[in-house]
Amino acid sequence: MSRAIALSDIHGCNRTLVSMLDHLAVSQADTLYFLGDYVDRGPDSKGVIDTIWRLQSEGYQVHCLMGNHEAITVYDYEAAHMQRGKRVGEANLLASFFAENILEIPEEYINWMRDLPLYIEIPGYILVHAGLNFKHPDPLSDAESLIWIRSWYESINRDWLGDRIIVHGHTPMPVTDAKAMLHNHLELPVQDIDTGAVFYNSHVFGQLCAFDLTNRALHFVPNIEFL
């Protein structure tokens, strides 16, 4: 049976991502949705993007969104080109490319990040990195909120949303809270899938989450970057 699966906030944890793909036994019949924040914080930002590109080249169905960390990286790259300020890029991001300055990151990676969409609509779901600003006349057109917003649940417009569920990352939450959300979609039609994978030394976080949208099931694997 084919599945639609969403993941978010991998943050340079490529070994953990590969572990999750193995755990899920992903096949080419499945469709993977990555909701942003592939880069920064963890040790292998380049490897995360390369893994996604490898999946695509091997015929897997993969769709990717922009996260705020991709937006920051593109901004820093363009600022460096324009010689505005002293932004050189996040340290772990640069290290994964063996770069000393953000301008040394191959342009194909920057172009890929720059061209990522901000949301995806599929039957029953809206997929986005951060969330939706329901105080805006058209929540899907508020680009900044789509990748940056926090604390927006109380303003959800149920008439606008209908029977859809919003799936997002960006705001880390404990695994127990993510599981509780899964069983509360009638009351709160939202699923946060950022369980702080990159925070490997935390007693609360340190798990990568995948949401099987087809079967309404959550999967978790621990961060293994530093084992």
Image (cartoon, helix red, strand yellow):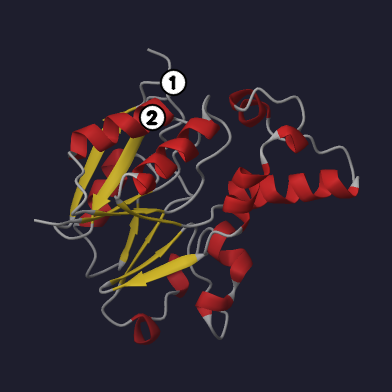
**C-alpha separation, residue under disc 1 versus residue under disc 2:** 7 Å
Image position, residue 144 (x, y; %): 63, 65
Q: Which residue is drawn at 30% across and 39% down?
A: 175
Q: The C terminus appears in which quarter of the rendering? A: top left
Q: The N terminus appears in which quarter of the rendering? A: bottom left
Q: Label 2 neighbourhood size at 10 Å, few (<14), some (14-19), many (20+)?
A: many
Image position, residue 79 (x, y; %): 82, 48
Q: Name the residue under label 1.
A: 201
SS for dot 2: loop
Kindly identify the amino acid type of the residue bearing the numbered disc 1: Asn
Q: Can residue 68 be seen in this view?
A: no
Q: Are marks 1 and 2 in contact (CB under 8 Å)?
A: yes
Q: Mark 2 points at which residue?
A: 206
Q: Which residue is drawn at 63% across and 56% down?
A: 114
Q: Label 1 neighbourhood size at 10 Å, few (<14), some (14-19), many (20+)?
A: few
User: In terms of image quadrants, where is residue 173?
Assistant: top left
Q: Is residue 110 visible?
A: yes
Left or right position of 206 against 212:
right
Left or right position of 207 against 47:
left
Kindly identify the amino acid type of the residue bearing the numbered disc 2: Gly
In the displayed orientation, state which residue is furthest to the left: 1
